[in-house]
Amino acid sequence: MLQVLACGAAIVTLSMGIRHGFGLWLQPITQDQGWTRETFAFAMAVQNLSWGLFGIFAGMLADKFGGYRVLVGGALLYALGLTGMALSTSTLVFALTAGVLIGAAQAGTTYAVIYGIIGRQIPAERRSWAMGMAAAAGSFGQFLMVPVEGLLIAQFGWKEALLILGAAALLMAPLAWGLREPGFSGQAAPVAREQTIAQALREAFGYRSFQLLMAGYFVCGFQVVFIGVHMPSYLKDNGLSPQVASYALALIGLFNVFGTYAAGVLGQKLAKRKILAFIYFMRSVAITLFLLAPLTPGAVYLFASAMGLLWLSTVPPTNAIVAQVFGVAHLSMLGGFVFFSHQVGSFMGVWLGGLLYDRTGSYDIVWYISIALGIFAALVNWPIREHPIQRGPQRVAGAAA
């Protein structure tokens, strides 16, 4: 178990740490290339949508053949995408590399695959805790990597910084060796399956609580990616230095270590739906207070710390609910579908941020949308049912028919 957690945590640290710093490249790239913020935001939106879409298929492949092969492929795509992002000279190539390629790479190196491996190898009584540990590692990656990325940009320039990160992404391939799963020979999986993929999907999408979980996760994606990508520019527009943004993103990562770990631990003791409802509601409260307070470095750091506690703390209880309700045989795939909803929200959050800024000269409308969506997510998560689905012989036979 220790090896699984250590290697999984290291991979998530690299993968999530790199992606959380992309907001630092918005102004250097747009100013150097003469592009609008909407152009950059659209590429990031495509990245999130690509991540969600490819995450479904990455989850299917990981469930069938094991996560190791998917993780190695994701590491190679990550390096290729970062290199292409650095060398892009047109908006189309930038959208394909920074958007499609890196999105596909993230699908193969983050939560859907890692949580599938954890779900299959960690006992159910410790699963929520283990997922919290993996999410906390991703948060530590943000705390560790974002200041490093800011330093790389300052010392070497934005292009060279991306090339250095591309080389670092290749380290995920040897780390994946520690996540090979016994029983995966390419022909058979170690988890007994009483359903086909089609039956598992039909069951999940016909279950009201699964639909509500997806709706809440849409909001999660909208909020965190809008803030992660656009907050550095929002702060600079209001006269604060780039260092304030770097420190703020790092604080989000640092406090998210505690938030995600706490969510994983509490998920073993409390109703996960109540944890999710609380997180979404408190996000709306934090954003409201941030907008009402004077914009000073201290206020930014306080907001970043509060949001950090709530940032990816939705991930452990969300995925634990999927495992608890539907089992682990198709966990990576079903987690991929839930995460796709998250990434549709991410697409909307980052793209609307750039679009409405270019149209109005302000991020205010998107901040207000984020507050309203947080309240909506709290309401839809409250009635979710967490008990396992009972599959009798007649039900399975009916599904097969």
Image (cartoon, helix red, strand yellow):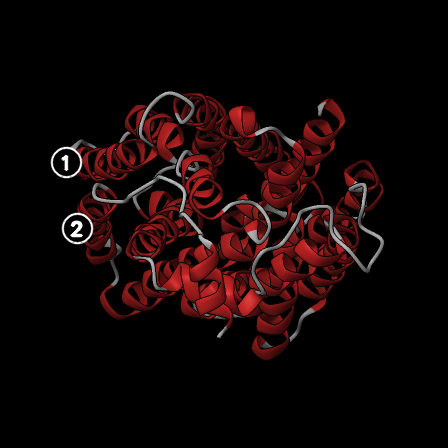
Please tell me how crowded label 2 is: few (under 14), some (14-19), or many (20+) other residues with Cα within 10 Å. some
Give x and y (percent) for residue 373.
Answer: 22, 51
Q: Amino acid at mark 1?
A: Leu
Which quarter of the rendered picture does the N terminus lie within?
A: top right
The residue carrying mark 2 is 372
Mark 2 or mark 1: whose residue is earlier in sequence:
1
The residue carrying mark 1 is 292
**Residue shown at the point (80%, 50%) measured from the top left:** 184
Give x and y (percent) for residue 224.
Answer: 39, 46
Residue 43 seen by the camera:
no
The foreground one among 283 and 70 is 70
Give x and y (percent) for residue 115.
Answer: 59, 42
Give x and y (percent) for residue 120.
Answer: 64, 40
Q: Name which quarter of the figure residue 318 lies in.
A: top left
Q: Residue furthest left?
A: 292
Please give left or right for residue 161 compared with residue 303 in the image: right
Please tell me how crowded label 1 is: few (under 14), some (14-19), or many (20+) other residues with Cα within 10 Å. few
Q: Amino acid at mark 2?
A: Ala
Numbered badge on residue 88: none
**Residue shown at the point (77%, 39%) measured from the top left:** 179
